[in-house]
Amino acid sequence: MKSSTLRYLLPAIAFLATQLIAGFLMGVVGLIFNLNPSEPILLTVTMLLSFLLAFAYCYWGLKAIRLPECFQHHAPSLPVCFIAIVAVMTGSLASNILCEQLNLTDIIADQMIRMATNPLGMLTIGLIGPVVEELVFREATLGTMLRNGVTPWATMITSALIFGIVHLNPAQVPFAAIMGLMLAIVYYCTGNIVLTSLLHIINNSVAVVQINLLGEEAKEFTLTQWLGGITNSWLVFAFCALACLALLIVFWRKSQTPSFD
């Protein structure tokens, strides 16, 4: 049992380890070429390298990523997929409002702003990162547990918690965990990462667009202020949370869950 548990945690452990490895390697490059560690290009290449290393280990080392099966689209019909998209987007808005009220420290806000305003950073955060994270956390982590007969809801909740924790940044942990649970439900109902990747890309791209529109002011931007106060924020939260829950139930019922044998 302990070895099985460790096996399920290995993709997440690899994800964290490759960040350290990439950070060390890029730190050495920075010293050789006398680059500031906070240079946008250095931060971006570090993130990109960590993603590629994590994918390589999960695919070749753990053999936990099924290619091309994980990209084969055998999801529900387009209208049902649209329900999932609206569900996750409303859930994302509700989660953002909730996390904003927790007022947790954001330790990477400056780095994200610097990365999100250069082309390679936009590509890494908005496209490459979401796809690799879906491969690691939905396909390699959640998929491996499901294929080994672990109870579906246990796998979805566990993978969501892992996804939240590995972000390490306090401001991101609860949001990532909630997003992870929604994406886990979509993955369980489709058996592939096509729709989950699209949802993840939309979510991250919205953040990239927001940063580029607001610049440094993105650090001070709050949904509470934008919505006109705390009362309005909680009303929007309640509406979005209920809408998300209702739509996910509809999506679940209209989906034909694939076999994970």
Image: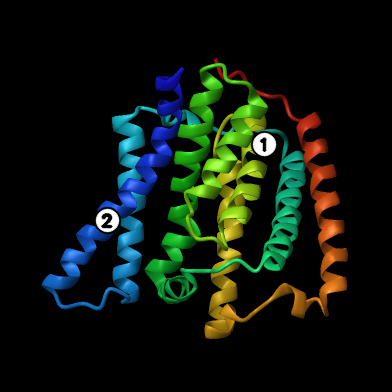
Scheme by which the image is coloured: rainbow
Q: Residue furthest left?
A: 32
In 3D space, how far apart are the residues under numbered discs 1 and 2 (Cα atoms)?
Answer: 31 Å
Q: Please state which of the two labelled residues, at mark 1 or mark 2, is closer to the viewer.
A: 2
Please give the residue where the numbered disc 1 appears in the rendered image.
185
Question: For numbered disc 1, what is the local secondary structure?
Answer: helix
How far from the left and from the top, in percent, is residue 138? 53, 37
Is there CB contact under 8 Å for labels 1 and 2? no
39 left or right, relative to 141? left
Q: Is residue 18 above or below residue 109?
A: above
Instruction: Give the quadrant of the C terminus.
Output: top right
How many numbered discs, if any?
2
Q: Is residue 225 above or below residue 150?
A: below
7 left or right, relative to 217? left
Three-letter amino acid code at disc 1?
A: Ile
Question: For numbered disc 2, what is the local secondary structure?
Answer: helix
Three-letter amino acid code at disc 2?
A: Ala
Q: Is residue 121 above or below residue 194?
A: below
**Image quadrant where residue 247 sits:** top right
How far from the left and from the top, in percent, is residue 1? 46, 17
Question: Which of these two is toward me, 67 or 239?
Answer: 239
How far from the left and from the top, in percent, is residue 145? 52, 25
- Per the rendering, the mark at residue 22 is 2
Q: Is residue 74 visible?
A: no
- Per the rendering, the mark at residue 167 is none
Q: Residue at x 43, y 54 (%)?
A: 128
Q: Is residue 256 above or below residue 53?
A: above
Instruction: Using a 10 Å C-alpha cutoff, classify the residue at mark 1 as few (fewer than 14 neighbours), some (14 to 19) or many (20 or more).
Output: many
Q: Is residue 177 visible?
A: yes
**Image quadrant where residue 105 sits:** bottom right
